[in-house]
Image (cartoon, rainbow, N blue to C red):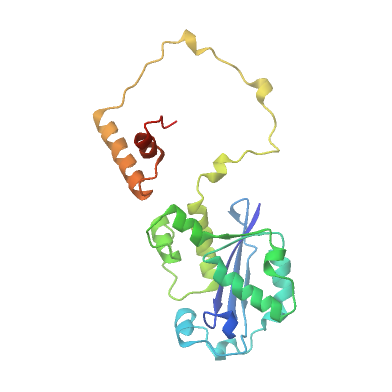
Amino acid sequence: MRQVMLDTETTGLSPQNGDRIVELGCVELLNRKLTGNNKHYYLNPERESDEGALRVHGLTTEFLSDKPKFAEIADDFLSYIAGAEVIIHNAPFDVGFLESELARANKNRFTSVVTKVVDSLAMAKHQYPGKRNSLDALCDRLGVDNSGRKLHGALLDAELLADVYIGLTRGQDALLMDANAEDKSATTQTIDLRQYDLPVLMASSDEIAAHDAVLVQLDKASGGKTVWRQAWQTGEPAL
């Protein structure tokens, strides 16, 4: 599966008010592995950046004045992301800007070219309800080194997002079956365990207490919506 982590930096917060993209960064994953086939553009937005936006990305009008306009890189960008599943942190923001830029350049819609857009911020909010889920906060929580992030940069943020996304979805690949794997059922041996006297190992009191503490934390994080609480309230079995 081909996935692209994507991030933008902009002149402000609203494409409807004429704000434009000043930087675009993409990082490619193939079967959840970094390939090094990345894309990075600095862009001339043909306008000044808002003071707040400039403090975030640090890309001055002077620096961007000789960079290509979005229309000049649009075809190359669309060719790169075509058919990919695109992961973006706070996707509605970036997608709104991309659709605006592509419309201005008379190109196909972003969402018509990619196979899917995944919002990693929405994923994080679902996984960590009630907690801070900015990219920096997730880096800290998931052990991703973001010490080089002094200012926001589209390519650096896309690289960090790749590590964060792998952390958010860790273990999911173990649930996927390889459709091309050979059927080894013919060589599988069945062992009758009735011939063995299998020991029964009981949990210690410390292990039971630790297990109960984990259940309490899970129940608290879910707002009391865990299966065992619902079963206890209804008097029905949990399974």
* Residue 185 position (above or below residue 178): above
Q: How many labels, in total? A: 0
- Say which residue appears at 54% left-offset and 76% top-offset: 9
* Quadrant containing the C terminus in the rendered view: top left
| Residue 202: quadrant of the picture | top left
Q: Residue at x 66, y 51 (%)?
A: 1
Residue 166 in the image: state x and y as whole percent. 52, 53
List the single residue furthest toward the front: 234
Residue 63 located left or right of residue 150: right
Q: Which residue corresponds to the image point at 51% horizontal and 74% vertical from the top-left?
A: 153
Classify 108 as above or below 138: below
Which quadrant holds residue 79? bottom right
Q: Residue 125, percent across and down? A: 45, 58
Examine the rendering and report whether any part of residue 83 can be seen: yes
Q: Say which of 190 and 234 sits in front.
A: 234
Vertical placement of residue 29 versus 95, above or below: above
In the image, 92 versus 133, the foreground residue is 92
Residue 225 figure quarter = top left
- Whether residue 19 is visible, yes or no, is no
Q: Residue at 71%, 38% (x, y): give it.
A: 180
Q: Position of residue 170 (x, y in %)?
A: 50, 48
Outermost residue to the top: 195
Left-right relation of 47 to 72: left
